């Protein structure tokens, strides 16, 4: 029996469900007593993303790279339910074909992250081709730039790492909290977070997270559910030995949302549509289902001389029913809707997709004195594999024609199927990093990673299996020089490389469908500075230059031709004084394509869907006459971006304001945290992004004004 029903429940049933769960959460909140133990404050630290940087716990203010770490308190404040909610706080991040009801698709420094290679969990590779829950995440780490020293294969732009919540470290510390929220839209959620230590001398620790959400977002006819069960434990075997393990099971079901598009013959953008409409939802539509079981185990051993040996294993098993009632226009060259705004409707279903990612890594880190210099060394070896095992066929069946107003389409005949392709990839990676102290103020940072990759694909068409394979080895370097001025800033210069293993999409419309396109190397140069003025003001700035081989569709093929270069400035500042805190970050990008020999019209043009300027800002005020109350106003601005290659149609810039009020207090000795948030305060209507996928132009509208109420109690 299926856990979820594909048929929508009556609105009265949904209302009763929400009332029941919210009432249950409120009842739990009232259980606290004056003797309950309270959680310590969670604060934002200056520690660098240690599991993704490759250089350990170096303070960000001294690190020769650009990175950001978004902690649990910030995730709670903004009500983050997916990584795009969190990372959009950073000016270097933008949407990139990011559907509201599908897995996250993001760009960093203008380059779209690869969901198969640019994501880590606890420092180990995972596939982000699923919906990843945030309820059991302690923080999100983002390393910006090329990441060849951190990952054997990855797109330039950045590397994302999820860090899970772990048991409390102090022997007498316990975690007992329950949370509930309502909105945006009519979604409602409840969550439980428990942690503590037990056993002789409190050597065993645990952290349990449970969450359930009834999804009914602001987009109509997009309802669904999600749930999470996660457990993390550790065992302090001796003062120098620790064993840590954790596992999570998540499931999500939700009806998909399709993007809008340009209209054939129009010389500009269509009017901004009602962002609350799911334009393709039909009575016969079925929801997508994303299920994942992910876990890891890690052993740490302190050795003589301050060295640390650690070995960890991580595995992720995904099962996906990838489904969408799909809008595809055939205006122009079948790259936009028809001239009257209508479009063809297809039923896409690829059920029982199974993906497995496994990795085993061992590393040794410590310090040596060589030739009178201090070397902070890390040696690492990792063996990993990614397997995609799909059903023999996927459905892509024509259903009829609809309009942007979402007219009904008759039930179609499920008779158009296409063969799927299975993929396998095995890799072995050896790496070494070294931070050399030339003096008390100057350091050299070196990194080298060698990767041996073995990839293969086979079509599930029994008449034409068409197997392909690629065996390759490559080495990616990274180096930097940093200098810390006494009572002044840290300045640095760095150079890094990364590698992508391009392949043509597995789509029958491509002449070279599924073919490997070789090893493609990207390069980055970064010059940066960061510093503090007392305890009230901090700042950072980085100039970057990234070159990447350009991949695009030409004459029915996916080709690699020319170079896509992004030059930009990433700068931020933060000021705090008494009750006030102001923070802001901006990124400016000049992105160009050059050197194309096949489609020479691209030379000198800007890549699509890359905003020229992005700005994030925050103003926060803490009330002295009402202890525990703070209010904030967030600003998000994204500049204009190109929609079509010739620049004849562009997406205008947009700006939104988000307001939030947070109140921390105690009720009968129980610490409670209340949140009221209003996103898009001015209810601005705008096109959020303009991606092009598989030869088709898409437009996604921004969210309207939405409200969210949340409460968390810690006992």
Image: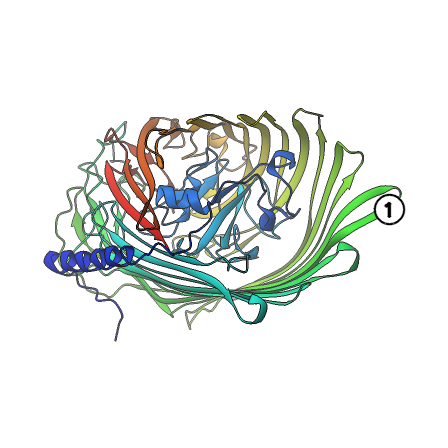
At a point 57% along the width and 33% down the height, the residue shown is 595
Give the mark count.
Answer: 1
Q: Is residue 437 left or right of residue 561?
A: right
* Residue sitting nearer the eye, 438 or 505: 438
Q: In the image, what residue occupies the spot 78% across and 60% down?
A: 304
Q: Considering the numbered disc 1 on the image, is that residue within a helix, a strand or a loop?
A: strand
Asked if residue 615 lies left or right of residue 546, the reply is left
Q: Looking at the picture, does residue 653 appear above or below residue 303?
A: above
Check the image and name the residue furthest to the front: 34
The quadrant in which residue 609 appears is top left
Residue 571 picture location, percent across and down = 53, 27
Which residue: 13% across, 57% down? Answer: 410
Q: Can residue 316 be seen in this view?
A: no
For mark 1, does the 10 Å Cα neighbourhood hold few (<14), some (14 to 19), or many (20 or more) residues? few
Picture quadrant where residue 687 is located: top left
Say how the picture is coloured: rainbow
Quarter of the picture holding the C terminus: bottom left
The vertical placement of 281 against 664, above or below, is below
Q: Give how far across and how far down residue 3 sits, in percent.
A: 27, 70
Residue 504 in the image: state x and y as whole percent: 48, 52
Position of the N terminus by quadrant: bottom left
Residue carrying label 1: 370
Looking at the picture, tell me which residue is in the foreground, 69 or 670.
Answer: 670
Residue 641 in the image, given as x and y percentages of width and height: 39, 29
Q: Which residue is pictured at 27% across the width and 31% down the height? A: 686
């Amino acid at each position: 029996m299926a856990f979820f029903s594909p048929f929508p429940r009556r609105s009265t049933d949904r209302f009763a469900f929400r009332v029941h769960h919210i009432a249950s959460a409120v009842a739990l909140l009232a259980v606290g007593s004056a003797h309950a133990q309270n959680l310590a404050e969670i604060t934002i630290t200056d520690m660098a993303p240690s599991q993704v940087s490759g250089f350990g716990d170096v303070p960000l203010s001294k690190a020769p790279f650009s990175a950001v770490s978004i902690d649990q308190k910030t995730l709670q404040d903004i009500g983050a339910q997916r990584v795009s909610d969190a990372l959009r706080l950073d000016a270097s991040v933008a949407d990139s074909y990011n559907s509201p009801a599908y897995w996250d698709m993001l760009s960093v420094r203008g380059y779209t992250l690869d969901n198969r290679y640019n994501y880590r969990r606890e420092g180990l590779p995972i596939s982000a081709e699923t919906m990843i829950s945030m309820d059991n995440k302690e923080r999100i780490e983002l390393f910006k730039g090329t990441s060849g020293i951190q990952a054997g294969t990855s797109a330039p732009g950045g590397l994302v790492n999820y860090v899970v919540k772990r048991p409390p470290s102090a022997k007498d510390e316990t975690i007992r909290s329950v949370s509930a929220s309502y909105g945006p839209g009519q979604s409602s959620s409840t969550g439980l977070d428990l942690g503590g230590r037990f056993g002789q001398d409190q050597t065993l620790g645990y952290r349990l997270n449970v969450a359930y959400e009834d999804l009914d977002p602001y987009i109509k006819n997009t309802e669904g559910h999600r749930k999470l069960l996660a457990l993390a434990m550790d065992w302090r075997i001796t003062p120098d030995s620790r064993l840590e393990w954790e596992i999570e099971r998540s499931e999500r079901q939700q009806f998909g949302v399709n993007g809008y598009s340009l209209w054939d013959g129009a010389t500009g953008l269509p009017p901004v549509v009602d962002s609350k409409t799911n334009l393709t939802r039909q009575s016969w539509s079925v929801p997508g289902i994303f299920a994942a079981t992910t876990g890891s185990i890690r052993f740490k051993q302190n050795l003589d001389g301050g060295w640390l040996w650690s070995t960890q294993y991580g595995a992720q098993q995904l099962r996906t029913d990838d489904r969408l009632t799909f809008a595809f226009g055939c205006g122009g060259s079948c790259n936009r809707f028809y001239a009257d705004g209508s479009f063809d409707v297809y039923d896409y279903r690829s059920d029982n997709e199974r993906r497995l990612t496994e990795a085993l890594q061992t590393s040794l880190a410590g310090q040596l004195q060589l030739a009178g210099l201090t070397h902070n060394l890390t040696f690492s070896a990792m063996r990993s594999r990614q397997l995609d095992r799909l059903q023999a066929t996927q459905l892509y069946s024509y259903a009829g024609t609809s309009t942007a107003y979402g007219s009904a389409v008759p039930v179609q005949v499920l008779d158009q199927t296409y063969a799927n392709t299975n993929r396998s990839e095995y890799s072995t990676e050896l790496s070494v990093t070294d931070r050399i102290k030339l003096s008390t103020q100057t350091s050299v940072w070196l990194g080298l990673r060698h990767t041996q990759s073995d990839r293969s694909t086979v079509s599930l068409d029994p008449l034409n299996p068409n197997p392909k394979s690629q065996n390759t080895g490559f080495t990616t370097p990274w180096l930097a020089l940093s200098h810390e001025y006494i009572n002044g800033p840290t300045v640095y210069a760095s150079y890094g490389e990364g590698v992508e293993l391009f392949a043509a999409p597995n789509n029958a419309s491509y002449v070279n469908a599924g073919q490997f396109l070789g090893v493609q190397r990207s390069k980055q140069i970064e010059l940066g500075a960061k510093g503090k003025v007392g305890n009230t003001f901090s700042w950072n700035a980085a100039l970057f230059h990234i070159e990447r081989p350009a991949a695009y569709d030409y004459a029915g093929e996916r080709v690699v031709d020319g170079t896509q270069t992004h030059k930009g400035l990433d700068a931020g500042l933060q000021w705090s004084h008494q009750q006030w805190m102001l923070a802001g970050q901006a990124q400016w990008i000049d992105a160009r394509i050059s050197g194309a020999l096949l489609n020479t019209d691209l030379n000198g043009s800007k890549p699509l869907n890359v905003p020229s300027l992005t700005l994030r800002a925050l103003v926060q005020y803490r009330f002295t006459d009402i202890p525990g109350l703070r209010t904030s106003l967030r600003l998000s601005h994204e500049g204009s971006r190109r929609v079509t290659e010739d620049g004849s149609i562009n997406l205008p810039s947009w700006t939104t304001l988000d307001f939030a009020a947070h109140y921390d207090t105690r009720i009968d000795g129980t610490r409670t945290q209340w949140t009221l948030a209003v996103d898009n305060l001015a209810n601005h209507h705008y096109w959020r992004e303009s991606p092009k996928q598989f030869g088709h132009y898409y437009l996604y509208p921004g969210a309207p004004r939405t409200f969210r109420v949340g409460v968390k109690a810690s006992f």
